[in-house]
Amino acid sequence: MAQSKSVSNHTTPDLSLYILTFNCGRTPVQPEAFAPYLFSALRSNLPGQLPPELLVLCLQELAPISYAFLGGSFLTPYLDAWNDVVKLACKDFDTSRSSNTGDADGDGSSDATVPTTRSTDYVNIVSRNLGLTAIMVFARTDVVDHIGWIQTAGVGLGVSDMGNKGAVGARLGYKWKDSSTVHPRSGSLNNEEEDEGPGEVQLTFVAAHLAAMEDALEQRNEDYKNIVQRLVFVPETKVATTANKGGGVRDEHAEDAPLLQGEFDVDSGPAQRNLPAESGIYSAHSHLFFAGDLNYRTSLLQPSPLDVQERFPQPTSDETDPKHFKHLLAEDQLTQQVKAGKALHGLTEAPIDFPPTYKYDPDGSKAVTLDGEQPWPWARHRWPSWCDRIFFWQPNGDVQVRPLKYTSLPLFASSDHRPVALAATVPLKAVSDTKQDQNAPFTIDPEWKGRRAMARRKELVVGLLAYLALTREGNGLLAATTIGAVGGWLILRSLLLV
């Protein structure tokens, strides 16, 4: 675990989290190119450092619309590529490190460090998409047994509620202080903690893709309202528990089923009996992280040629320079809407200290070197904007999220967005913030389930038509079917004429 802090004269351990959001540009990620940068938001990568205990990937434009709407095995190559990214990125971490054993002899001093070995592998415990938006949650192998239960949910925000835009969420219960829990730094729990019995911290992660274009500000606010009203978690009645670490269950993209991978059991019964029958993204007992291509811009209008020349940011450390990105950051729509109480109600964000994440004109051979002094290659018809963001709920009391680093990753040739990542910790202590339920800005739509079912049927029709019309495989299938039908008709006709 990332660290500990003193609370009421005893140690409260923290859970380390790492959240990344990326608009994939409907193109498979290249694992060898992306993996070296996946953990860029870690403050250091020192020998012996472990990757975070939970890793969450919030992905937009994961695949072409035909594959994304059909789901299932059509998305397998796209999700497998991200699994490969995680595996390759973990190779940069050592499997052994030194950790302090704590004051084992009770003399008030720290004892000498001893070498310990802990896994740097991850298990993919959630892979869920709704249309083109997906969420993948990974748990480090040494903590995966602490996952007590998982819920998933999604909502379409596109045409006729379909998932060309949308949001997908995962909520999980992380157990600690049970009979198998040992603090990774101290190696033991004190008697006070042992007497308290098992505990649980709830974590909610939402990946979202809101309406595009400069002038769609009000639609983006409406999209967030629809997420609050129609992204609804319900206790799961059927959970997959025996997927392989590498491959996964490939019927997992069903809209009404949780998508779980990993060699572990998830308790979908007793652990969820005390959960509400329906709950939205705001919960008095859960941390909330909201990430994605939120698409808020820095202007309501398209840029003029003069804007491109004089106001588009370029690399400079001089904050008085008109081309320093902080001048444009002052125009950020999302910051303004949050302050006005019109979007992401009650959520907060770590300070932004990175340039706009959109819209770039990628140069494939130089894309990953853009953190240097090279000019930023902006697309000239869109205002550079901080479209890709990660927000979180900050509960009251001593269970607050602690952001460690919030940054963008380099530009990759497959997308006109830069990824954004947040490294953070949360105390392993149950959240009980009744204000969060009371402050949910909108009530759950009683028709949410029927609207999602209707939209899903439309997605299948649109996905099939797009597959036949826009993909090479679909074109071949359509041609073969047409040839077969014509051939069959000619044979039947010849038989009838005999």
Image (cartoon, grey):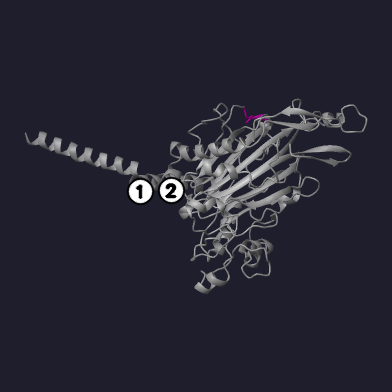
The image's mark for residue 25 is: none
Q: Residue at x 45, y 40 (%)?
A: 71
Q: Is residue 72 left or right of residue 482?
A: right
Q: Which residue ends up furthest to the right in the rendered image? A: 107
Q: Are marks 2 and 1 in contact (CB under 8 Å)?
A: yes
Q: Residue furthest bottom?
A: 306
SS of the residue at dot 2? helix
User: Which tag, 2 or 1, sits closer to the chain's start?
Assistant: 2
Residue 437's spot in the image, x, y percent? 71, 49
In space, the residues marked 2 and 1 are separated at their CA atoms by: 10 Å
**For the residue marked with disc 1, what is the amino acid?**
Leu
- Residue 458 is situated, as x and y percent measured from the top left of the image, at 42, 47
Residue 345 versus residue 153 in the image, above or below: below
Question: Split into 4 quadrants, where in the image is the C terminus?
Answer: top left
Magenta span of residues: 265-270
- The quadrant of the picture occupied by the N terminus is top right
Q: Is residue 170 shown to the viewer in this render? A: no
Query: Residue 441: within the magenta?
Result: no
Q: Residues within 10 Å of mark 2 (few under 14, many from 20)?
A: many
Residue 66: percent from left, percent from top: 41, 46
Q: Which residue is mark 2?
A: 65
Q: Which residue is mark 1?
A: 470
Q: Counting other residues with Cα less than 10 Å from the Cα at mark 1, is it few (<14), some (14-19), or many (20 or more)?
A: some
The location of residue 83, given as percent across then percent down, is 54, 37
In reply to whether residue 268 is colored magenta, the answer given is yes
Quarter of the image for residue 259 reads: top right
